[in-house]
Image (cartoon, rainbow, N blue to C red):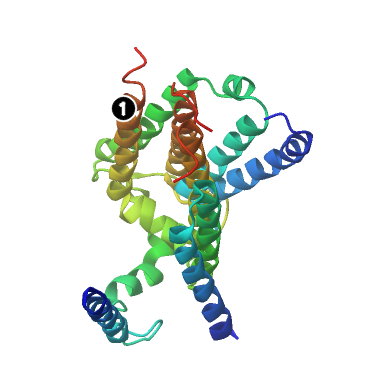
């Protein structure tokens, strides 16, 4: 059961990582990166590290996304 | 010809990475090199010596408190550097 | 951003996020979590408030002077609690042997100075996040999009 869930999460992680590099629109890339951080948080929870999971969900999916969106609102959206 | 060279080096890097992962110790195995006397000491004496239930918090703020002080200093220096770079051209 | 849906949802959600952040901070010695994660949750709740309403109303909630005081005060409290260990005749940053209140493990008032350091550091992390976001937003620069 746990192996099935881990395999599913890790394949989602790889798909997200490839999609971030392939996307031309920077705003879409940031949102996919937030999804990557959320999946990473669930993986930390599976590895029994709840501290890191909370930090990853707050900083990786929340603060980093907001800072990157603030940055592209000052610059260009297209690559 | 160039594609063959690129694919060869990519396969080489991939083989190295997979071989590294295959050599790593198993997750949660009791014979792992990380399962030495240090985590044993923290788990057995941690609650008694620091009074915490969350042993990770006890390690961060009691045993390794000087590390955490340095971490807070790094955060302070980082925000100071970012502000001085962002506010440099506004005055 | 002048969107009714975003405003209503964030007005309902922000208190719950802040209570969760305070829970993570104050129970840092009992449950998983601590200063850095709790501070990040608290800071992102303030950023959500400032984004969904306009930035001026959010800036009134936490001025730049208050952010400066929190920023420097966090480290200052940490270092002062460390120097108390030297005054008590032990090493720098000694907890229970320096005479802080030990309490019963598992209760809220326990574990010596850990809860003070957690609260101070958490407010410092939250103010770092908020200050960085405000200064990034307020920097002059032409928006191309």
C67 vs B48, nearest the viewer: C67
Residue B10 horizontal side relative to residue B57, left or right: left
Q: Residue at x 36, y 37 (%)?
A: C78
Q: Residue at x 53, y 54 (%)?
A: A34
Q: Is residue A4 above or below residue A32?
A: below
Which residue is most to the front? B1
Q: Is residue C101 above or below residue C131?
A: below
- Pinpoint residue A67: horizontal percent, then vertical percent: 48, 40
Which residue is most to the top? B91
Quadrant for the C terminus of chain C in the image: top right
Give the residue number, with chain letter if any, for mark 1.
Answer: B85
- Pinpoint residue B51: horizontal percent, then vertical percent: 45, 57
Quadrant for the N terminus of chain C in the image: top right
C137 vs C65, nearest the viewer: C137
Residue B50 visible in the snapshot: no
Residue C62 visible in the snapshot: yes
Q: Residue at x 57, y 84 (%)?
A: A4
- Pinpoint residue C134: horizontal percent, then vertical percent: 49, 28
In the structure shown, which secondary structural element does the residue marked by tag 1 occupy? helix
A17 vs A43, nearest the viewer: A17
- Pinpoint residue B30: horizontal percent, then vertical percent: 36, 86
Q: Is residue A42 above or below residue A29?
A: below
Residue C136 horizontal side relative to residue C18, left or right: left
- The image shows a total of numbered marks equal to 1
Q: Residue at x 68, y 39 (%)?
A: C14
Q: Quadrant of residue C43?
A: top right
Structural crowding at the residue carrying mark 1, measured as other residues with C-alpha within 10 Å and reported as few (<14), some (14–19) or many (≥20) = few
Q: Is residue C41 above or below residue B83?
A: below
Q: Dot 1 falls on which chain?
A: B
């Amino acid at each position: 059961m746990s192996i099935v869930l881990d395999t599913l999460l890790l394949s989602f992680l790889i798909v997200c990582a490839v999609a971030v590099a392939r996307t031309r629109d920077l705003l879409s890339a940031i949102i996919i990166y937030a999804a990557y951080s959320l999946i990473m948080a669930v993986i930390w929870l599976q590895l029994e590290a709840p501290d890191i999971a909370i930090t990853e969900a707050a900083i990786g999916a929340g603060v980093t996304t907001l800072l990157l969106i603030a940055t592209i609102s000052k610059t260009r959206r297209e690559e | 010809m160039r594609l063959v060279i690129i694919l060869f080096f990519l396969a080489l890097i991939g083989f190295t990475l997979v071989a590294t992962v295959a050599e790593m110790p198993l997750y949660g195995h009791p014979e792992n090199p990380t399962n030495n006397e240090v985590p044993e000491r923290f788990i057995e004496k941690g609650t008694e010596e620091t009074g915490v239930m969350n042993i990770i918090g006890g390690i961060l703020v009691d045993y390794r408190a000087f590390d955490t002080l340095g971490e807070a200093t790094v955060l302070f220096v980082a925000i100071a550097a970012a502000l001085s770079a962002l506010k440099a051209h506004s005055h | 951003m002048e969107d009714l849906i975003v405003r209503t949802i964030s007005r309902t959600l922000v208190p719950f996020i802040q209570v969760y952040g305070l829970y993570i901070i104050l129970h840092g010695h009992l449950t998983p979590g601590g200063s850095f994660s709790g501070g990040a949750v608290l800071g992102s709740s303030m950023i959500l408030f400032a984004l969904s309403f306009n930035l001026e109303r959010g800036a009134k909630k936490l001025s730049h002077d208050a952010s400066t005081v929190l920023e420097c005060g966090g480290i200052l409290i940490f270092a002062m609690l460390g120097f108390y260990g030297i005054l008590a005749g032990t090493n720098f940053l000694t907890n229970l042997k320096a005479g802080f209140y030990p309490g019963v493990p598992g209760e809220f008032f326990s574990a010596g100075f850990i809860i003070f350091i957690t609260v101070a550091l958490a407010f410092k992390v939250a103010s770092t996040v908020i200050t960085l976001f405000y200064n990034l937003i307020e920097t002059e620069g032409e928006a191309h999009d």
